[in-house]
Amino acid sequence: MKATDLIQLVFTALAFFLSVYATVKIVKFNKRQNEMEEVQVELNKLLLRKETNEAIGSFKAELGVNFIKMTINNHRLKVFNRGKGPAKNVRINFPAGNEMIVQSDVESKFPLEVMEQHQSVELLAATYYRSPNKMIIELIWDDDTGLNQSKLFYPTL
């Protein structure tokens, strides 16, 4: 074997190993690129889901209730909307019975046609020595996300 043939063989082997190395590097790069694209797609889905939830939240009413102590034996039940959207046709039920809230006050204020954001309604509560400390209250309302939304509340004195 001549020296030139040996040099040519060395260069050929070197070129072969260089091309194998370059191919391996390109395959690894493409794999990382595909992983980055998958991560980007997932991030876009999460961002879209977040934006959709925020858009829905701007139309959603979020009602709540709480007892307010005015004086020692004078309480009121406050029904409020802390959501961003208005609640329409707000109804109130007492699944376990109504022993404390003045029924005539309930009948005069409910069903409430519209309860805007940060709006509230107070109902008179007649408490006595052995009145229960907790009530079960169900609020039912309509908003721009759907009809007959309902939630149970357990306010305590």
Image (cartoon, helix red, strand yellow):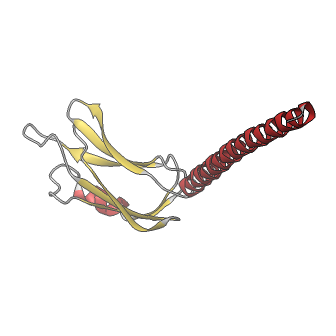
Work out whether 144 lies above or below 18: below
As displayed, is residue 156 above or below residue 34?
above
**Of residues 105 and 24, which is closer to you in this image?**
24
Quarter of the image for the N terminus: give it: top right
| Relative image position of residue 37 (x, y in whole percent) | 67, 49
The residue located at (90%, 30%) in the rendering is 3
Q: Residue at x 89, y 34 (%)?
A: 2
Looking at the picture, how far across and down is residue 137, in whole percent? 25, 54
At 28% from the left and 58% from the top, the residue drawn is 138
Check the picture and name the quadrant holding the C terminus: top left
| Extreme-left residue of the structure | 130
Q: Nearer the viewer, residue 32 or 108?
A: 32
Closer-to-camera residue (10/102): 10
**In the picture, residue 90 is in which quadrant?**
bottom left
Residue 41 in percent (x, y) is at 64, 53
Side (left or right) of 139 relative to 8: left
Q: Residue extending furthest bottom? A: 147
Relative to residue 45, is residue 21 drawn left or right? right
Classify residue 87 as left or right of residue 131. right
Q: Image point 18% across, 43% down: which residue?
A: 134
Left or right side of 15 for 104: left
